[in-house]
Amino acid sequence: MNEITIIKPDDWHLHFRDQDMLLETVPATARCFERAVVMPNLVPPVTTAELALSYKERILAARPEGSSFTPIMTIYLTDKTSVQDIKDAKNAGVLAAKMYPAGATTNSDSGVNSLESLYPVFEALADNDILLLIHGEVTQKHIDIFDREKEFIDQHMVKIVERVPHLKVVFEHITTKEAADFVLSARDGVAATITPQHLLLNRNDMLDGGVRPHNYCLPVLKRSTHQEALRAVVKSGSPKFFLGTDSAPHAKHRKESDCGCAGCYSAWSALELYTQVFDELDALDKLEGFASIYGADFYGLPRNTETVTLVRESWEVPSNIILPNGEPIVPFFAGKQVAWKLK
Ligand code: NCD
Ligand code: ZN
Ligand code: ZN
């Protein structure tokens, strides 16, 4: 197959950042995605309906002329989030709340310290039909960084899913076989997003032959057996797994540093790279479900009606992009060939 047409996809997890960065990130996503779930880890974080609505306006203002792209807004849970905050979010049309364990990842310092005290908020989310999106890694420093996702499942995820049985939960950007197995065997109402980097790469791509900061993201790339498990699960066509790029821009100097930031800026190549992966897996017939159907169905939103077409044509990801503030950023897969191209 040299050409594939699918329902226009949505991105169920990404980071647009704010201010003039939006002029770069919003068009990059709007070029092929109809909707995107926008992560709230700004500085300061988007913790309330009011902040989410004003952020939404700034995103809409950065859309390219004539674009119908629609951001799906989220709020950031903290130790102080109240049941009233959730009701306000519902009234403002916020569809999801994001939980970062405090310190787990980029801009998560205001995240949750005591998960146990958040159960009334989880109940309120379920009662108001708001999804809970989880960065699933423990933050205990004595736990090996490669084991933090698995530990999160054992310590927290099992409990959350069992104790609030009517809550819809998305295990974001899963990276391990344990996470894939957990989601596969979990009750209805539990799903996961998977990034292009975790399907394409494993930890050798970050560390073999030299440190590659542009492949550093959180949860960190795992060994190849985990990559293989993620590839198997998308190939299976299970509707519990859908597209979430986790496109997360950081300026070049913030990544190429003695303490480099976590995050891969993949918006310019993500859809094409997912297509490449499904092609490698001989599973192009499963791409549309993963990219355009399962996420919308899980969120309870209508499926898109337009289509996009990808063609088998090699192109090279640029080595640099200049941000609106003049700083360079190195996109994910910079300088590498991608086998599929958006028509
Ligand atoms: C994300 C970011 O930069 O905001 N970074 C990342 O490595 N994935 C945060 C996140 O999604 O955990
Ligand atoms: Zn995360
Ligand atoms: Zn993210």
Image: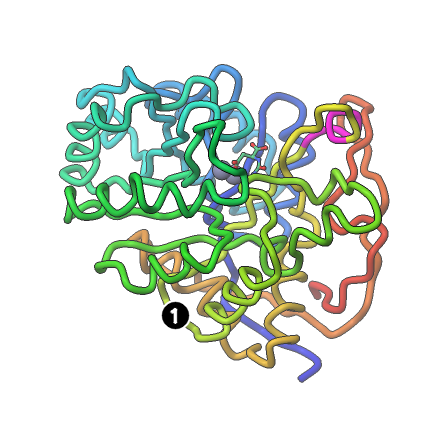
Is 239 placed left or right of 283 in the picture? left
Quick check: 275 above or below 146? below
Q: Is residue 220 visible?
A: yes
Q: Name the foreground residue: 268 vs 147.
A: 147
Q: Name the foreground residue: 310 vs 217.
A: 217
Magenta span contains residue 292: no
Q: Position of residue 334 (x, y in %)?
A: 80, 48
Q: Name the foreground residue: 268 vs 148.
A: 148
* Farthest residue, direction bottom: 1
Residue 81 occupies quadrant: top left
Q: Position of residue 112 (x, y in %)?
A: 35, 23
Q: Bounds of the magenta span?
A: 250-255
Which residue is rendered at x = 33% and y = 38% of the image?
Answer: 96
Which residue is rendered at x = 53% and y = 60% of the image?
Answer: 226
Q: Which residue is mark 1?
A: 238
Residue 300 occupies quadrant: bottom left
Q: Position of residue 67 (x, y in %)?
A: 57, 46
* Farthest residue, direction front: 142
